[in-house]
Amino acid sequence: MSPDDFRTFGHAMVDWIADYQERVESLPVMSQVQPGDIRAMLPAAPPETGEPFADIMADVDRVILPGVTHWQSPNFFAYFPANTSGPAILGELLSAGLGVQGMLWVTSPACTELETHMMDWLVDMLDLPGIFKSTSTGGGVIQDSASSATLCALLAARERASSFAINRSGGTGRMTAYATAQTHSSVEKAMMVAGMGREHLRLVDVDATFAMRPDALAAQIAQDRAAGFTPAFVCASVGTTSSNAIDPVRAIGEICRREQIWLHVDAAMSGTAALCPEFRWIHDGLE
């Protein structure tokens, strides 16, 4: 594709997206297909040659759009918020156009420093303590998903509890982790990936609002220590996907500090509400 073609087709694609945003409210929220309908309209073998851009866009309208559940519709209220916007779409376009890899500072200094600085901005926007900034003992890193972030936190907790021995010699011993039945399923999956075993994930009792009970957490930790286990990780939620339950972070944090257990706070569902001062109570005790 030549630069001139890219300009032409790019303008056409932006027009299509803008038109879609204007009409998405009028479309049925749920897809209008049955299982297998989309595949039945696709060639059995991969194409050996390209197609004109106009034909591809026609396929988007004919094949893809009927099979879309319209998450961007104002009538969509399922699962969790996952909305985009014009500025976000243009940002994705620019990012894809630059196509850099930011795994190290030297591979893209602008990528690394922009990420670090924006994470520090987020600390200010949420009114978190300064220790969360990169200029102190903190610093943020963007993960590809909340599930990956949970896994990273669990691995860090595992290494801390083992004095970093597991990365050297393997084995997880009898480490335990704590969550509730309302906690996101990524915690259970992370337990399996980290080699800690889902049988070592304790589901702590909840109260009438489906929030974790600190007294039940403390009792479970004491019971596990008495049985020879090593409590290593607690996941508190600021908004669960099933009930939007908000765990009492401060009370849970006090237990974790006393017991020297890693506390991970999953705020993927509702944490952004703390951008509004009147909702900052949801992360009280995060420090």
Image (tube, rainbow, N blue to C red):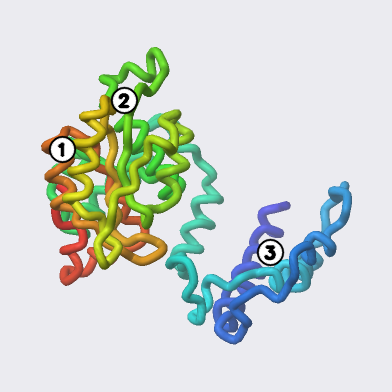
The residue indicated by pointer 3 is 9
- What's the mark number on residue 159? 2
Nearest the viewer among 112 and 232 is: 232
Residue at 21% from the left image edge and 49% from the top image edge:
216
Relative placement, left or right, of 78 versus 253 is right
N-term-proximal mark, 2 vs 1: 1
N-term-proximal mark, 3 vs 1: 3
- What's the mark number on residue 136? 1
- Toward which corner of the image does residue 159 lie, by quadrant? top left
Relative placement, left or right, of 85 versus 281 is right
- Report helix, strand or loop for mark 2: helix
**Amino acid at dot 2:** Glu
Question: Tags 3 and 2 in contact by the CB under 8 Å rule?
Answer: no
**Amino acid at dot 3:** Phe
Question: How far is the residue under mark 3 from the one under mark 2?
Answer: 50 Å
Q: Nearer the viewer, mark 2 or mark 1?
A: 2
